[in-house]
Amino acid sequence: MRIRTLALAAASGAALLAAGVLPANASGTARPASIREGSVSASDLLAKVTSCQQVSNGKYRTDDETSATIPVCGKNGAVFWKADMDIDCDGQRTSKCNENTDPWYQDDTAFHQSNGKPLRADSLPYVVVPSSSSIWNYSAAGIKGGGVVAVIYNNKVEYAVVGDTGPTKIIGEASYATAQALGIDSNPETGGADSGVTYILFKNSQVSPIESHSAAVSLGDQLAKKFLQNN
């Protein structure tokens, strides 16, 4: 998970430039961003989340130094929020996600693959939910590890799974692979999106195995169609 200040981000970015270090996604091996996964468009999904019926007891910050302005909103069969995207590179240690590329790197995720290993952030699209607190309890809301999430940015839809938990007061974080798929800078230290990201989490859903992105897309497409019908 990423917990940092903007000042630290700026300083670390300047240090990278001074050292001539390229960001992790500058290798030319990033998988191309897709316009849509499945058959449901970003515009159709966004049309259903224009207003918020707040289900959280309070609101979240997007970063340590911002004010708490982001509520968790309820819809039939789902919850959603609109926030930024910080980059989570936690889980299995790889060439893209490790202590050298990410100062906040942790070698574990809250939810694990079917073989017991942590998730792999640089290849599996996953979303980070705030750890349960008095503000909101994700599990009580029907959100599970491996649950399906439609992540929408710049008219693109990417299906992901609930893969990790983060700070209790901060919201808006997803894996390296999620960012890459949406055309967002996936560098865990300096990347991300400041705003404009919508996360729609489908209640009582669960991808099996959690590490199967194709299974997430297949189930996500079904749930997105049902979401449009029921809202």
Image (tube, rainbow, N blue to C red):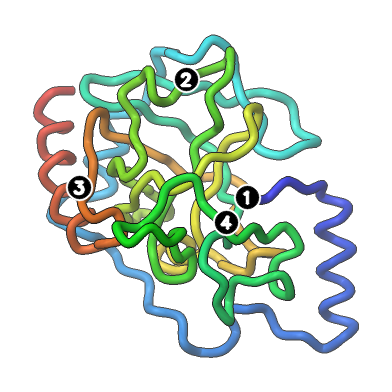
Categorize mark 4 by other alpha carbons within 10 Å: few (<14), some (14-19), many (20+).
Answer: many
Query: In the rendered structure, which disc, 1 or 4, sits on the residue that comes first in sequence?
Result: 1
Observer-nearest of 118 and 11: 118
- Mark toward the start of the polypeptide (1 vs 2): 1
Q: Which residue is mark 1?
A: 1
From the top left corner, tell me how far across and down residue 198 is, in percent.
Answer: 43, 41
- Hey, which residue is sitting farthest front in the picture? 116
* Residue 27 position within the rendered picture, expressed as x and y whole percent measured from the top left: 56, 89
Residue 73, horizontal then vertical, whole percent: 41, 21
Disc 1 marks a residue whose amino acid type is Met
As drawn, the label of residue 220 is 3
Can you tell which quarter of the image residue 108 is in? bottom right
Report if the CB atoms under discs 1 and 4 are less than 8 Å apart: yes
Q: Say what amino acid the circle numbered 4 marks.
A: Asp
Closer to the N terminus: mark 2 or mark 3? 2
Above or below — where is 28 with respect to 183?
below
> Which label belongs to residue 58?
none
Q: Which residue does the numbered mark 2 point to in the structure image? A: 137
Q: Is residue 86 left or right of residue 34?
A: right
Depth check, mark 2 against mark 3: the one in front is: 2
The amino acid type of the residue labelled 3 equals Gly
- Distance in Å between CA atoms under marks 1 and 4: 5 Å
- Judging by the rendered image, the residue that carries numbered circle 4 is 88
- Mark 1 packing: few (<14 Cα in 10 Å), some, or many (20+)? many
Q: Amino acid at mark 2?
A: Asn
